[in-house]
Image (cartoon, rainbow, N blue to C red):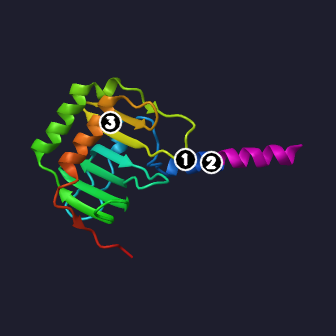
Amino acid sequence: MILPTILSFALVLACKSKQDTTQDSSSNTATSSTEQSTPVQGVGGTTADSLVMSIERTPCFGACKAYRLHVYRSGYATYEGRVNVEKVGMHDARIGRDTLDAILREAERIGFFALNDVYDSQVTDLPSTTIYVALDKRDKRVLGRVGTPPKFKAFAEYIEELLLPMAWKPIPPQH
């Protein structure tokens, strides 16, 4: 009786420790802006830079584009093309303040912070879009896959229209 109790306790502590030391980038819950302060990889970012906006599209069983794009307060941005995209691999760019402000204004205009955190169902072959925005001491992450409002879809397309054509430069793999 004591051995199973000790093993259960050790497992709980191990899982808790792992949660404390790892950051799950696929988390769908909103986190505070201070939790989003991360060292920026590649050229041009600083360790004090914080994430302002991100968009991620996941693959499907068809030809859906899949990528991750992060924009930091300084304008430094990273793009990771995965599949069915023009640029595959890690890239970086500088986003102009006016472009970033336009995205943040659009988030306000569509009521991004009032959207549900998740629009989803038990469907596995559909792609998802996750958008994160930090603005005025608020931040929110929204995952959309099934039943996503048209304004969320239009916001994702707006972000892509502004950011995907940027002059993305490949980041050489670090070994």
Q: CA distance from mark 1 to mark 3?
A: 32 Å
Image depth: mark 1 or mark 3 in front: 3
Residue at the location (60% across, 45% down)?
16
- Outermost front residue: 62
Q: What element does badge 2 sit on? A: helix
Image depth: mark 2 or mark 3 in front: 3
Tell me, yes or no, if residue 86 can be seen here. yes
Residue position for label 3: 153
Residue at the location (23% across, 54% down)?
77
Q: What element does badge 1 sit on? A: helix
Dot 1 or dot 3: first in sequence order is 1
Residue at the location (21% across, 50% down)?
163
**Disc 1 to disc 3: CB gap under 8 Å:** no
Q: Which image quarter is the N terminus in?
A: top right
**Disc 1 to disc 2: CB gap under 8 Å:** yes
Q: Which mark is residue 160?
A: none
Nearest the eye: 117 or 137: 117
Residue position for label 1: 19
Q: Provide the residue span drawn in magenta.
A: 1-13
Q: Which mark is residue 15?
A: 2
Q: Main secondary structure of the magenta part?
A: helix
Q: What element does badge 3 sit on? A: helix
The x, y position of residue 166, in whole percent, is 17, 56
Amino acid, disc 2? Cys
Res. 99 image quadrant: top left
Q: Which image quarter is the C terminus in?
A: bottom left
Amino acid, disc 1? Gln
Nearest the eye: 56 or 21: 56
Dot 2 or dot 3: first in sequence order is 2
